[in-house]
Amino acid sequence: MNRKIRMGMVGGGPGSFIGGAHRRAANLDGKIELVAGCFSRDPAKGAITGAELFLDPERVYTDYKTMFEKEAQREDKIDLVSIVTPNAAHFEVAMAALDAGFDVICDKPMTTSLEQAKALADKVHSTGRLFALTHNYTAYPMVRQAKQMIADGVLGDIRKIVVEYPQGWLADAVTDDNKQGKWRTDPALAGISCCMGDIGSHAENLAEFITGLEITELCADLTSFVPGRTLDDDGSVLLKFNNGARGILFASQIAVGEENALRIRIYGTKNALEWAQEDPETLTMRSNTGARQVMRRNWAGAGAAWSRLPAGHPEGFFEAFGNLYTDIANAIAARADGVEYTTSYPTVDDGVRGVAFIENVVKSSKTASKWIKFEV
């Protein structure tokens, strides 16, 4: 392509953390340009965001359906729709975007029900559009380094996977000024789960992404610790994988003092790997037969293919998000140029598994027997 990918955004108005993260990520490598948006259900708030971003007022819309209709008629129409709304709106916005002929990049979880997720996957496959899900932790360079090492057999056969994601920001009742906490704890906006839907799904996706394995059975225990809260704010899950490996996943948003402590350890027959989101530049490998090996991003080639800066110049959250946006920009460009491109971003099928994970965890937590087959 001889131009930037033109993007429209749905959601991400005043007070949105994730909307700003998406915009910075999309702009990071200079391949995507935000040209249109429906940023809020409140037209006044949407206009404020559009003005702050110096967008043409004619391309700042009051509802997403109007945006898709009018953009589809433009010669310089958008190519890509970024969906950064609360969970409950993902499905209807994504379906409308696909029907209008646009590619989609969507926040997770993809939908609030497995039925919706499957319908959305069918739509993606039938339209042939591109669909990326922003499990941004899969795009950290050292996470992709770990995935490559496992695919190359460095760990041997995988036996044990331990993944944890503790946060402390919802340890108390949510106040009215906490916009992010309000919608995440509201079943009408978040769906059937708060903690597992919000961050447990990241842990599930990370475990399957790095190892290439799939969960086949699970046993879950969910709790709502904060009085009056209807959705879970803490959970623990035992896992079985399709190669016979066992796993432990825990996620909590009432872990006082924790910030964003996503961490994974993977144990094979030869070696073990460990990565932590709060120290993302480091990937550690251990064994019983040699010294511990500490790999650093873009040093001696580790993670170099997914890095922008030399070693010692930290890359983090925005850069990982940027890798996903660059992945889908490259895929759009490759399609336009008629060349093959192997995608490395999470797809709509990963989104289906993520929603299935949430539903299976909630189901298991409510049963007396606990262990259930992972049904998709």
Image (tube, grey):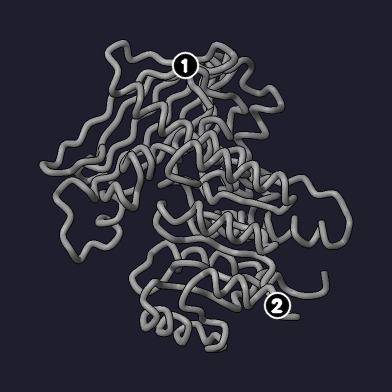
Q: Which residue is mark 1?
A: 373
| Res 48 → quadrant | bottom left
Residue drawn at (40%, 72%) of the image = 40
Vertical arrangement, residue 176 with respect to residue 247, above or below = below
Residue drawn at (70%, 44%) of the image = 125
Give coordinates of residue 89: x percent, y percent: 44, 56
Vertical arrangement, residue 101 with respect to residue 297, above or below = below
Cα separation between marks 2 and 1: 47 Å
Give coordinates of residue 314: x percent, y percent: 51, 57
Give coordinates of residue 118: x percent, y percent: 57, 38
Q: Point out which mark residue 73 bears.
A: 2
Judge from the rendering whether residue 270 lies leftward or rightward of residue 108; answer left or right: right
Instruction: Name which of mark 2 and mark 1 comes first in the sequence.
Output: 2
Query: Residue 26 or 93: which is nearer the viewer?
Result: 93
Query: Residue 34 or 124: which is nearer the viewer?
Result: 124
Element under disc 1: strand
